[in-house]
Image (cartoon, grey):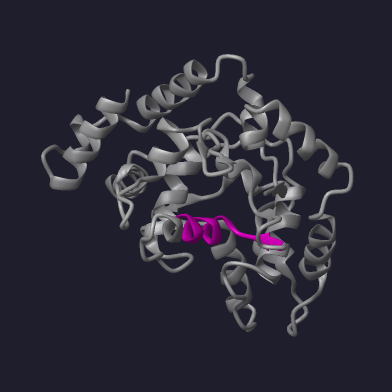
Amino acid sequence: MKKLLIATLVLGLFGGASLSVQASPEQDLKEFRAYFKNRFPGTPFNDFVNGVYSIDAASREQWEEIEEFPPYELNIEKGETLFNTPFANGKSYADCFDKGGIGIAHRYPFFDQESGQVITLEGSINACRAVNGEKPLKWSKGAIADVSAYMHYTSRGQVINVVVPSDPAAQAAYQQGKNHFYAKRGQLNMSCADCHAYNSGNKIRADLLSPALGHTSGFPVYRSKWGGMGTLHRRYGGCNKQVRAKPYKAQSDEYKTLEYFHSYMSNGLEINGPSARK
């Protein structure tokens, strides 16, 4: 699979093939699942939402103790309060979303054919504020992570269902995210896949590398390293820094399309966020 993925990446990056001859998202998903099933045969498919705790018994034991008093509970409460607090015009977040914003996180991100953009949940939160005359929230942590945490919490148990339409622009956005996932970058010349696919389950210093399958299901996350809650794009930025690459800005096209691909690869798994990680 690694050779196939690298070949596909090279074609995509250098224009050697059109989208019509590249693997379809459905084919990619089938291959992605099979790779991790073969790499971790003792891990049930549905358990991959628990990240590294799904593949390492010792780490899981420590994590289960933490989950008895989850450090993100206060963030959910803060997020619920913010979500239900009216804006200055009397409206609230519930007025911006289908189903009042409850139980919908599994649909994100999605490709909006009208604007030609990947729409993330955090992007929609700030878009809601903008149309209601409110200032935008900072992207990576703080209030936006709390509101997102609450919305994800109301979606727990919902099956991730990210759709990639046949529209050429949507396919191109998906391919851009896929290329980002497999492209090497930084002084350490490493890709997302190097750590979280090919070396998943191996140690880097004292840390065990988690499998990419199910990654996005647990966000936003409370990280012990951060001492607080953060969004998926905050984590992307941190990963770039760890390989000594300059990170993109949160909610950049690069990170939005990466999230699009990354989330699509977790289709069929349940939303498990917010969650706690090291």
In this rendered view, identify the residue nearer to me: 276 or 131.
Answer: 276
Q: Measuring 75% from the left and 85% from the top, which residue is drawn there?
A: 88
Of residues 135 and 244, the one drawn nearer to the viewer in this rendering: 244
Is any part of residue 164 visible from this angle? no
Q: Position of residue 154 (x, y in %)?
A: 77, 48
Residue 266 located within the stretch drawn in magenta: no
Seen in the picture, residue 173 relative to 25 is either above or below; the reply is below
Residue 259 percent location from the top left of the image: 47, 50
Task: Verify whether residue 230 appears in magenta.
Answer: yes
Q: x, y (%) of residue 41?
A: 56, 14
Q: Quadrant of residue 235?
A: bottom right
Could you say which quadrant of the image residue 30 lies in? top left
- Give the vertical position of 252 relative to 209 (above or below): below
Image quadrant where one finds the N terminus: top left
Q: Is residue 266 left or right of residue 44?
A: left
Range of magenta residues: 228-239
Of residue 208 and residue 7, the one placed in the foreground of this image is 208
Residue 151 visible from this viewpoint: yes
Secondary structure predominantly adopted by residues drawn in magenta? helix
The residue depicted at 13 percent of the width and 46 percent of the height is 14
- Whether 29 is drawn above or below 130: the answer is above
